[in-house]
Image (cartoon, rainbow, N blue to C red):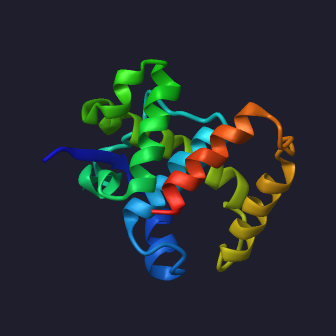
Amino acid sequence: MVNVPYKKTDIYDALTEEHGIFEYYFDVIMFMAVLGYREGEIETEDYLGDEDERGSIGIERFHNHNHYHAIVAALAFQKTGDPSTMADPDVHREIIPQYAAGGLKVYKREFGDVAGDPTDALANYIKSCVDDEEVIREDDELQTIIQSFDDEMFNT
């Protein structure tokens, strides 16, 4: 079994146990990794933190969820440009905590000053990200690829 070490701060506890936004730490890790990727924040130096704030989770938590596995594979490819890394658990073991640590930076910057439950602030942030995206024309080839992927993933 391959374990993924990651920088675990009190934010993980707040988002799972205190506010119940996420059910499990691996959900928070995936959210942070996507947040890090979206904002161009990847931490390649201090992405595990010190021993007091280091967590570890089995990589199967990500690989056993189709959507998470696809995200991890895409992040690996985005970082390396090498398609073979999409199926390499050793690369995934490194990529996940690097993007998640970057996401923690973004989270602290965007939501660090939110007093109380951050649920509404997170929802508004996500909505603003969707609203900011360019509308893709229906005849665009990228739209065709996205639609094909969605059809395959969500109609099974």
Question: Residue 89's x, y, as percent?
Answer: 26, 36
Residue nearer the viewer, 72 or 41: 72
Q: Residue at x 50, y 40 (%)?
A: 99
| Residue 109 % position (x, y) | 69, 51
Q: Is residue 58 in sight in this rendering?
A: no
Q: Is residue 154 above or below residue 45?
A: below
User: Does residue 85 appear in this view?
Assistant: yes
Drawn side of residue 4 relative to residue 45, left or right: left
**Left or right: 154 as drawn, with respect to 92:** right
Camera-side residue: 102 or 93? 93
Q: Nearer the viewer, residue 151 or 106?
A: 151
In the image, is 61 to the left or to the right of 145? left
Quadrant hosting residue 114: bottom right
Q: Residue at x 43, y 75 (%)?
A: 23
Query: Dividing the image into 4 quarters, which one contains the C terminus?
Result: bottom left
Q: Is residue 78 above or below residue 4?
A: above
- Give the image quarter of residue 12: bottom left
Tell me which corner region of the image, top left, top right, bottom left or bottom right, holds residue 85: top left
Please identify the residue farthest to the left as the structure is shown.
1
The spot of residue 60 in percent (x, y) is 25, 53
Q: Tell me where residue 42 appears, x and y as whole percent.
A: 54, 33
User: What number of labels is visible?
Assistant: 0
Q: Residue at x 31, y 51 (%)?
A: 63
Residue 155 position (above or below residue 143):
below
